Amino acid sequence: MCRNIKTLFNFEPPATELEIRDAALQFVRKLSGFNVPSQANEAAFDRAVEQVAGSARELIQSLRTSAEPRDRAVEAAKARARTAARFGAAR
């Protein structure tokens, strides 16, 4: 799976439209193999990004959980700690 796609469900504050679109863009880039599509493929690429973003938005809005929302700052700190443990402290 794409390492750059982050979990967007059950966070406080909720995922923004930009975060959803960025995740969709990363997903379409991974599927297509294009970082930037050619002019011939640009319309199909952009359409795919919008469709994936719409599906992601619908999914996030329809999911339910009884768990408390996670805090973005706390989760980011945990990720930095995992990275430091895996690769060593930054120099």
Image: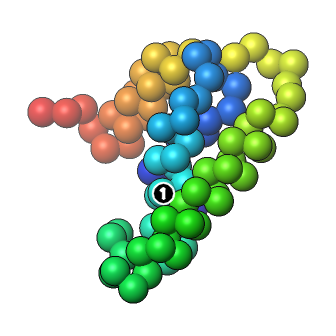
Q: Which residue is drawn at 61% across and 16% down?
A: 12
Residue 85 visible to the viewer: no
- Label 1, on which residue? 25
x%, y% of residue 34? 39, 75
Relative height, residue 7 to residue 35 (above, below): above
Q: Where is residue 64 in the image (x, y as percent from the top left)?
A: 86, 28
* Badge 1: residue crowd in 10 Å (few <14, some 14–19, many ≥20): many
- Residue 13 falls in which quadrant of the image? top right
Residue at (41% x, 74% y) in the render: 42
**Residue at 54% of width from left, 30% of height from top?**
16
Q: Residue at x 58, y 67 (%)?
A: 48
Q: Quick one: which residue is furthest to the left in this view?
A: 91
For the image, the number of numbered tags is 1
Query: x, y (%) of residue 79?
Result: 45, 32
At label 1, the amino acid type is Leu
The N terminus: image quadrant: bottom right
